[in-house]
Image: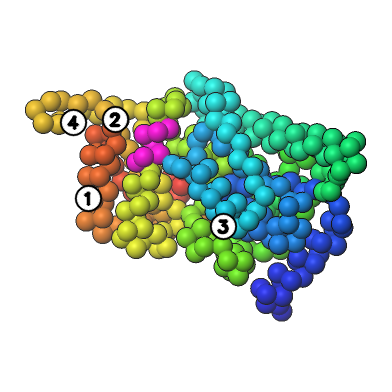
Amino acid sequence: DWTMEEFIGKEIARIREICGSKGRVIGAVSGGVDSTVAAKLMHEAIGDRFHAIMVDNGVLRMNEAKQVHEMLNKNLGVNLTVVDASDMFLSRLQGVEDPEQKRKIIGNTFINVFEEEAAKLEAIAEKEEAEGTEKKGKIEWLLQGTLYPDVIESISFKGPSATIKTHHNVGGLLADMKLKLIEPLRELFKDEVRALGRLLSIPAPLVQRHPFPGPGLAIRILGPITREQVKILQHADSIYIEEIRAANLYDQISQAFAVLLPVRAVGVMGDKRTYEQVIALRAVKTEDFMTADWFVFPPEVLRRISSRITNEVEGINRVTYDISSKPPGTVEWL
Ligand code: XMP
């Protein structure tokens, strides 16, 4: 039996012991709960010897890179670099429709960008070493925000989500870099990570945030991915989430997001016919994401969301609500 306060103290001491007095630690942050909590814990333990890297892959939610920078760097004091690699990601994704191919491209490009950032840091460390001004040392560790369920899944590798879709939270990255792993959350469940986040003064909206997939909006744009399509989806999705929050429903929903369909539908605006795209809204309630039920919205909330999206998002003239459960549907459309 242990309390979360004790866990923090013990874990910080453990990290300090592992990391000694020199050597840098790098870790990717996404803006999600796990990587934010892990990053804050590392910062508490070893300060600026921990370098957080956020990769903007061009398929994040609206203003996400900016918000993560604001939160992690300005508010929590974490040493963070945001890398805008959106051109590289979007050009590699051009014309790709197969969802597994999208996941592979995003996973591999992420590793390329992350390794490039690590190489830049390593070059700085080597230069400092040569000049005799070195303070933090070379990169020796890689932080991963792995949770207990990820550890189990990567060992047994039997869950339907693991076999049906490729998840890349564990492994991969390490092969080339030969870094030692630090996984401060590997014994915790999601609820415990949230409690830990609250104790580390991470703001409640972030601690309660719905999960967001690594491949981001790329698996929510069903047709070709272009900057224009990303913008349309970001805008619709931000209105959707804003209205869910305004209606005080966010915490009752496990995950909510918008999907951009690659079809055009006929509509009318003034005395003109329109021929524009369709947004599908998804909101589910689930315990473990293996099965899920669609969320029952009060009709007036759906009405308001639909009217705002069709009025405010250029290129959309129709909104549908997804009433499929999992199974047979999945949470994501791709
Ligand atoms: P599905 O669509 O499999 O989604 O019912 C279950 C949960 O997994 C998330 N998901 C992913 N997360 N990379 C991720 O990091 C992925 O490729 C991926 N695919 C699905 C999904 O958002 C939901 O929370």
**Residue type, label 3:** Asn
Is 84 inside the magenta-drawn segment? no
Q: Which residue is mark 4?
A: 267
Q: Which residue is mark 2?
A: 315
Mark 3 residue element: helix
Task: Measure how far apart labels 1 and 2 are at the Cα level.
Answer: 19 Å
Indicate which disc, 4 or 3, sits on the residue closer to the N terminus: 3
Nearest to viewer (mark 4 / mark 3): 3
Q: Which mark is residue 303?
A: 1
**Residue type, label 4:** Gly
Q: Residue furthest top?
A: 95
Mark 1 residue element: helix
Q: Is residue 249 above or below residue 331?
A: below
Q: Is residue 238 above or below residue 265?
A: below
Answer few, some or many: residues within 10 Å of disc 4's Cα (few below 14, many 20 plus, some between 14 and 19): some
Quadrant location of the N terminus in the rendered image: bottom right
Q: Quadrant of residue 11?
A: bottom right
State the extent of the magenta-drawn residues as a range. 230-236
Task: Measure how far apart labels 4 and 3 are at the Cα level.
Answer: 45 Å
Q: Quadrant of residue 120?
A: top right
Residues at badges 3 and 2 in contact (C-beta under 8 Å)? no
Task: Measure how far apart labels 2 and 4 are at the Cα level.
Answer: 11 Å
Indicate which disc, 4 or 1, sits on the residue closer to the N terminus: 4
Answer few, some or many: residues within 10 Å of disc 1's Cα (few below 14, many 20 plus, some between 14 and 19): few
**Residue type, label 1:** Arg
Q: Which residue is mark 3?
A: 75
